[in-house]
Image: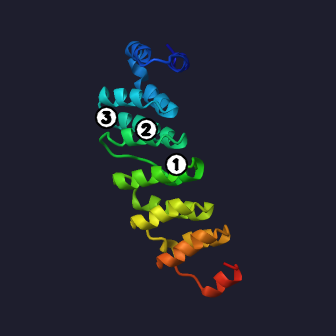
Amino acid sequence: MTPDEFTSAWISETDHESKISILMMNEEYRDLALFLSAKKGDGEMIQYLIDNTVFDNTESFEARDRAIRAAIKYGHVHILKLLLTTKGEIQMNMSRLIANYYTPSLGECIRLLLEDGREYPLERELQLINTSSKRGYFECLKLLLDDGRADPSTFNSSALYSAIIGNHKECVQLLLKDGRSQIPRSFVKKMKL
């Protein structure tokens, strides 16, 4: 069975027993099944896959991370919660998530990833604050500032400049209130913020 044939068979089945049968005959597509279940928001199948998969190597961690991205992209917070119960390091470019997958539930997903504590190295934290500021994602920016791991004043307060240039007044006010970002007041007045 090819990956496309597996995907078609997986999507066409509606009951979990049939999906498990397909998976048993095509064990090499376990990672694909994890991704497709996360995309669909199928919590029962995700739990089955978590219970019957050993997450102990780079390949299994990458498959889990692809499923996490799918859960975030399609707004399945319940799937993200299940996937975060697995062990192992999470490699996620949260800045790219914010840039590409903005959904009403993104703030909740970011909060869960921050609380999980396995997430992103320091250089990504700054990118994440900058992306949130640049795009005007107030709730995500607030979560990141409250988390406290990233310093918005890094690189000459580029997060604040991004918010100002994007004319995102709430984000500018939040960054100024935070107190770590500093720019000349004349610049703020000139931008009518």
In whole angstroms, how far apart are the C-alphas of marks 2 and 3?
Answer: 16 Å
User: Which mark is on residue 79?
Assistant: 2
Q: Which residue is mark 3?
A: 55
Mark 1 belongs to which amino acid?
Ser
Is the residue under label 3 in contact with that under label 2 (CB below 8 Å)? no
| Residue sitting at x 59%, y 48% | 100
Depth check: 169 or 184 in front?
A: 169
Image quadrant containing the C terminus: bottom right
Mark 3 belongs to which amino acid?
Phe
Q: Which residue is mark 1?
A: 105
Query: Residue 171 sits in which quadrant?
Result: bottom right
Circle nearer the viewer, 3 or 1: 1
Graded by Cα atoms within 10 Å as few (under 14), some (14 to 19) or many (20 or more), the crowding at tag 1 reads some
Q: Position of residue 62 (x, y in %)?
A: 41, 38
Q: Position of residue 96 (x, y in %)?
A: 54, 51
| Residue sitting at x 58%, y 52% | 99
In whole angstroms, how far apart are the C-alphas of marks 3 and 1?
Answer: 26 Å
Q: Position of residue 8 (x, y in %)?
A: 55, 18
Residue 133 visible in the current orientation: yes
Graded by Cα atoms within 10 Å as few (under 14), some (14 to 19) or many (20 or more), the crowding at tag 3 reads some
